Image: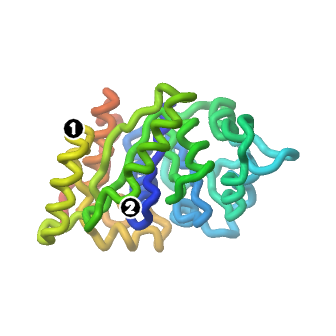
């Protein structure tokens, strides 16, 4: 089971968009995938479910000392085959108040206790540095860092890397799988400048795939859909399929379990 945290403390960098569509892309290719929403804003949750459809959440698994439920009881099957979701709740913000060693490892223990492990677990982390992020890093094997192609693209990334370094002490297997440029517009000089700066700093750790600025990516969640379902021929669909393939390649896993629909790209 490969657990990947999608993290950046800076908001508006496409963190949830990446978590949602990477999870969908892996599932469509045939990998059993679990998407866990660790953000109290619940954007990943709302991409797939109406509030009234949710009765148990990640807060019921991790928050409190009595009557907590197993992670397996907070899973919901999405309409995408092979993709399950553990939804967030506003109470998930209470994780940042948990300071004991036992509390810090609750997410890891919950994942380890799953009776039917997944091929992939994707963690949509909050856009803050805190104990919720610490729980995610302690439970993860890899981190993907989305970085928006804009002025000061590395703002906050150095602090995130400090958190990753600290988490490596108790979790030495943790590593950055890659840095991902998002919100890229090829006609904007600032985007090209940001890309060059990130490439200079991270080199081969930067994914070759660039997520282009795409209206369909912003609209898809309103329809409770991934980009593949909402706009299969869009730039967004092409970019996230390419990213999924690149991640699988970096992990030496097959990229051809099942074809992703929509190869032709509408300009």
Q: Mark 2 points at which residue?
A: 14
- In this orientation, does residue 216 appear? yes
Side (left or right) of 214 relative to 28: left
Q: Residue at x 41, y 69 (%)?
A: 220
Q: Which residue lies furthest to the right in this view?
A: 66
Question: Is residue 140 or residue 196 the one in the foreground?
Answer: 196
* Residue 36: x %, y % from top left: 57, 49
Side (left or right) of 24 relative to 151: right
* Residue 249: x %, y % from top left: 28, 33
Q: Residue at x 16, y 54 (%)?
A: 196
Q: Which residue is drawn at 27% across and 55% down?
A: 181
Q: Quadrant of residue 204?
A: top left
Name above or below for residue 106 compared with residue 1.
below
Where residue 69 is drawn, which disc sits there? none
Q: Name the residue under label 1.
A: 204
Q: Within 10 Å of the Cα at label 1, are there few (<14), some (14-19), or many (20+) other Cα atoms?
A: few
Asked which secondary structure carries label 2, the reply is loop
Side (left or right) of 12 relative to 171: left
* Residue 152: x %, y % from top left: 29, 63
Q: Within 10 Å of the Cα at label 2, are there few (<14), some (14-19), or many (20+) other Cα atoms?
A: many
Q: Which residue is drawn at 25% across and 47% down?
A: 242
Name above or below for residue 121 compared with residue 261.
above
* Residue 92: x %, y % from top left: 68, 57
Asked which secondary structure carries label 1, the reply is helix
Q: Which of marks 1 and 2 is nearer the N terminus?
A: 2
Which mark is nearer the camera, 1 or 2? 1
């Amino acid at each position: 089971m490969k657990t990947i945290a999608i993290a950046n403390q800076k908001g508006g960098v496409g963190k949830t968009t990446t978590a949602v569509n990477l999870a969908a892309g892996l599932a469509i290719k045939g990998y059993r995938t679990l998407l866990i929403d660790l953000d109290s804003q619940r954007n990943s949750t709302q991409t797939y479910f109406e509030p009234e459809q949710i009765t148990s959440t990640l807060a019921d698994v991790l928050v409190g000392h009595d009557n907590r439920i197993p992670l397996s009881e907070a899973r919901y099957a999405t309409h995408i085959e092979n993709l399950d979701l553990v939804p967030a709740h506003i109470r998930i913000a209470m994780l940042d108040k948990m300071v004991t060693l036992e509390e810090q490892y609750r997410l890891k223990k919950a994942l380890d206790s799953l009776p039917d492990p997944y091929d992939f677990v994707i963690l949509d982390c909050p856009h803050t540095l805190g104990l919720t992020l610490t729980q995610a890093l302690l439970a993860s094997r890899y981190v993907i860092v989305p970085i928006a192609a804009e002025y000061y693209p590395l703002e906050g990334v150095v602090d995130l890397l400090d958190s990753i370094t600290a988490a490596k002490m108790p979790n030495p297997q943790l590593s950055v799988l890659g840095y991902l440029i998002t919100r890229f517009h090829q006609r904007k000089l600032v985007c090209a400048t940001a890309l060059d700066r990130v490439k200079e700093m991270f080199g081969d750790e930067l994914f070759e795939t660039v997520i282009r600025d795409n209206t369909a990516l912003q609209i898809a969640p309103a329809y409770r859909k991934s980009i593949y379902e909402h706009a299969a021929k869009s730039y967004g669909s092409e970019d996230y399929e390419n990213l999924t393939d690149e991640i699988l390649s970096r992990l030496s896993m097959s990229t051809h379990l099942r074809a992703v629909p929509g190869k032709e790209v509408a300009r």
